[in-house]
Image (cartoon, rainbow, N blue to C red):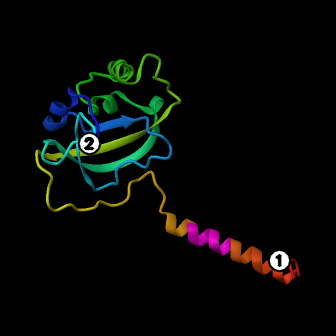
Amino acid sequence: MLFKEYHIPLIRSGSKTVTRREWDENYSGPNVGTVVAATTALFTSDEEADCYIRVLDTYEESLGEMTDEDAQKEGDYEDLEDFREGYERVYGEGAWDPEKVVTVVEFEYVGRERPTNQTTLKANRARVPVGPLLFGAACIVLLAVAVLIAWGVGA
C-alpha cells in the first residue's frame, strides 16, 4: 500500500494506524487480516520493503463524519482542521468535501519483515455477508417463478 515518505516513521511508531483513500469504486482494496507492505513506491519487492502492516478493518465513511480523534489516528495531526490541510496537500486543493465518501483502512504495524504466519481476521463491520443475501434473493426468484407457473404464465 502506498504512503508518503513522512508516513513510514509514523506507522512504525504506532501514531498512524488509519488511512483514508479515494479509491475507484471498482477497486476492493486489501482484505481484512492480510499483511501488506507499506511503501513509498509501486512494485516494491519484499526484499526492498521494510515496513509491514496488518489490515484490521476497512469501511466507507464520509469525510464529514470524521472527528478530531479520527484525525489524530492518521498520524501527526492535532485535530480535524490540521488533517484537512494535510488531506488537501495529498489530494489537491479543494479535495476536501464533507460529503465525499472515502475508504477507511485501519491497520497495525507488524514489523520490518513480512510475518510468515498470517491469520485472517473476521470480516469488517461495514460489509454485509453476501451468502445470506444471495440465498434470500434466490428464494425470492424461485417464489416468483413458482407463482408465474401457477398462473400459467410462460407456459
- Residue 43, numbered label: 2
Q: Does the segment drawn in magenta span residue 45?
A: no
Q: Residue 121's x, y, as percent? A: 29, 60
Give left or right: position of 139 versus 100: right
Residue indicated by mark 1: 148
Q: Which residues make up the magenta segment?
A: 134-140
Instruction: Judge by depth and name the residue closer to the eye, 67 or 132.
Output: 132
Residue at left offset 73%, top offset 77%: 143
Q: Residue 94's x, y, as percent? A: 47, 17
Instruction: Judge by depth and name the residue closer to the eye, 47 or 12.
Output: 47
Structural distance between the alpha carbons of marks 2 and 1 = 54 Å
Quick one: SS at disc 2?
Answer: loop
- Where, by quadrant of the figure, is residue 15 drawn? top left
- Which residue type carries mark 1? Leu
- Which residue type carries mark 2? Phe
Give left or right: position of 144 versus 73: right
Q: Nearer the viewer, mark 2 or mark 1?
A: 2
Residue at left offset 46%, top offset 54%: 127
Quick one: SS at disc 1?
Answer: helix
